[in-house]
Image (cartoon, helix red, strand yellow):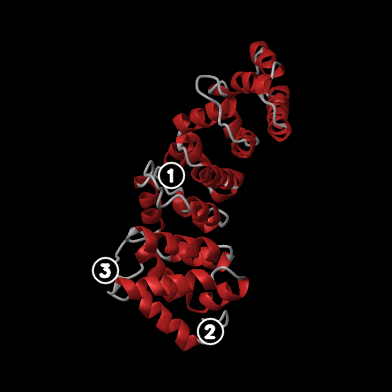
Amino acid sequence: MAAKVDRQELLDLIDFLNSPRREVQEAAIGLVEGLSGSLEGIENLLRESDKLLPALLKLIGADKDLSKGALTSLINISQKEEAVAQLVKLKVLDSSSLAGFNVAVLLKRFLDSAGQQPDPHEHTALVLTNITRLQQGRQLLLEPGRGTLQALVSQLDSSSQLRRSGCTNAIRNCCFRAEEDGTLGDLLADTASLENILDLLCGVTRKKEGDAAVRNSLAESVEMLVSTEHGGQVLWDLKAPEMLRKGYETEEDPEVCASMERIAHLFLADSGTAEDTTTDQDSRVQEI
């Protein structure tokens, strides 16, 4: 199929994705995946995004080949913000057969497949990164009771670099706008996840994250939380300055070191303006 398709061809292609015959679905997903490999193709596909995206989501969790093609297509398409916005809006795709099917189901299938070899859903981490670039997506994932931060942090122990990188970037996106989004309190309430983030960054009681880019995303997440008054206090109580000092001593990547230094300056600035800051707290921050 040419990169440029007319509306009827596109509608036919979507019908093929919904076909009960596997061989028809397999051919259709191959065409969609091919179209999603170029910006022109993505723009063509997005003309019927309200029909296409639900069809692709239905194929996630099907057999390995169909699921992989659907995820690859979704990742490619979600380069466009309008596609991400549409994904976020799909809380209920089809009341007759997919009631309640939403982005949370995408996350659940991603989590349930953790540890499988080969990993059928590791690319979902990139979809989650794209979803968290939009405020609506961040707020949806961080709805109270959903446990998204804990879920994302749980993937940071994965052997898949793609899972770790995608989840860390999603965490960073959520932290960057948490105060503006109204989700800061929920993020900070999950102190166990925050401790895990600090430990993966600093390697105090566990092995430090081996990928420098992932460590830098973790450091930037901490930096954004510390930059808020509430976040700074919570992380102080979690002994973040002490952990960061130990992590800094063994950190070799210059970007991660720079992020840690910015965090230290934020703690120092806070200790300099807080009237009830103790001498012990001052000395601990200055050791970073």
**Dividing the image into 4 quarters, which one contains the C terminus?**
top right
**Residue 13 as seen in the image, left or right of residue 268:** left
Which structural element holds mark 2? Answer: loop
Q: Is residue 240 above or below residue 106?
A: above
Location of residue 22 in the rendering, given as x and y in whole percent from the top left corner = 31, 71
Q: Amino acid at mark 3?
A: Ser
Classify mark 3: residues with Cα within 10 Å, few (<14), some (14-19) or many (20+). Answer: few
Residue position marked by numbered label 2 in the rendering: 5
Residue found farthest to the top: 280
Q: Amino acid at mark 2?
A: Val
In 3D space, how far apart are the residues under numbered discs 2 and 3 (Cα atoms)?
29 Å
Dot 1 or dot 2, earlier in sequence: 2
Which structural element holds mark 3? Answer: loop
Location of residue 208 in the rendering, given as x and y in whole percent from the top left corner = 56, 27
Dot 3 or dot 1, earlier in sequence: 3
In terms of depth relative to the viewer, which is nearer, 251 or 190? 251
Q: Amino acid at mark 1?
A: Thr
Task: Please report the residue visible at 69 percent of the width from the left and 13 percent of the height from the top.
Answer: 283
- Labelled disc at residue 148: 1
- Labelled disc at residue 184: none
Marks 1/2 in contact by CB < 8 Å: the verdict is no
Q: Is residue 27 above or below residue 138?
A: below
Q: Based on the displayed image, in which of its 4 quarters is residue 284 positioned?
A: top right
Residue position marked by numbered label 3 in the rendering: 97
The answer to whether one can see residue 148 in this image is yes
Classify mark 2: residues with Cα within 10 Å, few (<14), some (14-19) or many (20+). Answer: some
